[in-house]
Image (tube, helix red, strand yellow):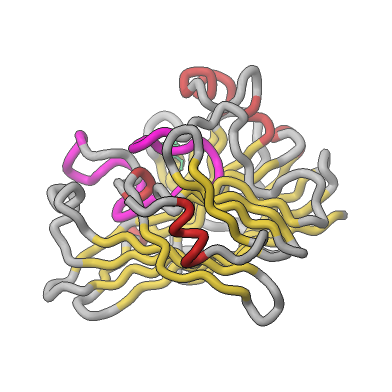
């Protein structure tokens, strides 16, 4: 396995992009440029934290109980859900949200954008470990551009000779002052699958506010969402392309306590998930020899 030292030699960028080995044995990339700081774990190509320097509080949230462990997902950040979202359609024993977030990815490129932002691209190829769950020839790349904005491009390429279908999401945890003082706008009048209790199809009316467990897959929407945070007095803009589903989730007290890694006693109150993806009726057929891009761009503004 490649070492942090080898990665720094090949892909490091001064003190703007530095690779280090975490106590868990996983490798983490630390970003620190004039615009922002960020952290990304190479396992899962998992962006763990992003804080624009204009913000005293990170915009992408990491649980204070997040644990880095080989083969385990990390609580917070922007997990890559791929090549399915949620439970596998037919195999209950397959991992929820796919395997991409818990396997090693390779760094294939890094650089500095013309505006000074820091860029990295990681790649996931099929392996004998994943083939039983994904018997297709494919290439998955994630490019992350760290600046005053955060841009992530998840590119699926079908390198085989038959079409395949993917579900996917960048399952981003955003940091908020308190979930009870948050509104999410942009999804008014959208249909959504409400997954709390029996899954039912409903329609959104107005902005989304929170007073209990909320787990909704909004479908057939390419809308930009805005997280309006009255406590931190900021708005987070979540723009996307190549995504027809937006998932909004907070576990609330009972589910958070069962999960055990949301940051005791009530770390869950400081996050809300707004996930950009393609799920349920929005899964994507990637024809042989073609590519599909899911792109998100986040920015925060003080109000
Ligand atoms: O995106 C919402 C959701 O599907 C919830 O149902 C909950 O399971 C959440 O993802 C977290 O899933 P994880 O597998 O990361 O614990």
- In front: 224, or 234? 234
Residue at coordinates 82% horizontally, 42% vertically from top-left? 232
Residue 52 at x, y percent in the picture: 74, 56
- Displayed quadrant of residue 285: bottom left
Is residue 75 covered in magenta? yes
From the viewer's perspective, tell me whether residue 143 is left or right of residue 200: right
Task: Using the image, determine if residue 44 lies above or below residue 72.
Answer: below
Q: How many marks?
A: 0
Residue 97 at x, y percent in the picture: 35, 45
* Identity of the residue furthest to the right in this view: 303
Residue at coordinates 69% horizontally, 49% vertically from top-left? 59
Looking at the rendering, the stretch of residues picked out in magenta corresponds to 69-93
Task: Using the image, determine if residue 232 lies above or below residue 296.
Answer: above
Residue at coordinates 66% horizontally, 82% vertically from top-left? 114
From the viewer's perspective, tell me whether residue 92 is left or right of residue 100: left
Is residue 287 covered in magenta? no
């Amino acid at each position: 396995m490649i070492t942090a030292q080898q990665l720094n030699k090949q892909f490091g960028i001064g003190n703007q992009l530095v690779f280090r080995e975490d106590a868990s044995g996983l490798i983490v990339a630390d970003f620190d440029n004039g615009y922002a700081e960020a952290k990304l774990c190479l396992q899962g190509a998992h962006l763990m934290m992003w804080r624009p320097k204009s913000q005293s509080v990170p915009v992408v949230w990491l649980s204070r109980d997040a644990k880095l462990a080989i083969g385990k997902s990390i609580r917070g950040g922007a997990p890559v859900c791929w090549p399915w979202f949620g439970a596998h359609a037919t195999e209950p024993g397959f991992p929820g949200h796919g395997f991409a977030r818990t396997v090693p990815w390779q760094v294939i490129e890094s650089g500095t954008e013309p505006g000074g932002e820091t860029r990295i691209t990681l790649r996931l190829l099929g392996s004998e470990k994943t083939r039983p769950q994904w018997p297709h020839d494919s290439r998955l790349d994630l490019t992350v551009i760290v600046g005053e904005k955060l841009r992530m491009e998840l590119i699926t390429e079908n390198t085989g000779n038959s079409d395949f279908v993917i579900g996917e999401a960048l399952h981003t945890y955003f940091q908020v002052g308190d979930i009870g003082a948050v509104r999410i706008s942009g999804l008014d009048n959208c249909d959504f699958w409400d997954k709390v209790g029996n899954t039912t199809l409903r329609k959104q009316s107005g902005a989304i506010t929170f007073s209990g467990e909320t787990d909704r897959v909004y479908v057939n929407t390419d809308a930009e969402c805005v997280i309006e945070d009255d406590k931190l007095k900021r708005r987070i803009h979540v723009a996307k392309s190549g995504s027809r589903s937006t998932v909004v989730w907070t576990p609330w007290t009972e589910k958070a306590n069962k999960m055990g890694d949301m940051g005791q006693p009530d770390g869950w109150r400081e996050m809300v998930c707004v996930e950009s993806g393609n799920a349920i009726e929005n899964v994507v057929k990637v024809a042989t020899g073609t590519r599909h891009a899911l792109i998100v761009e986040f920015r925060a503004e003080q109000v």
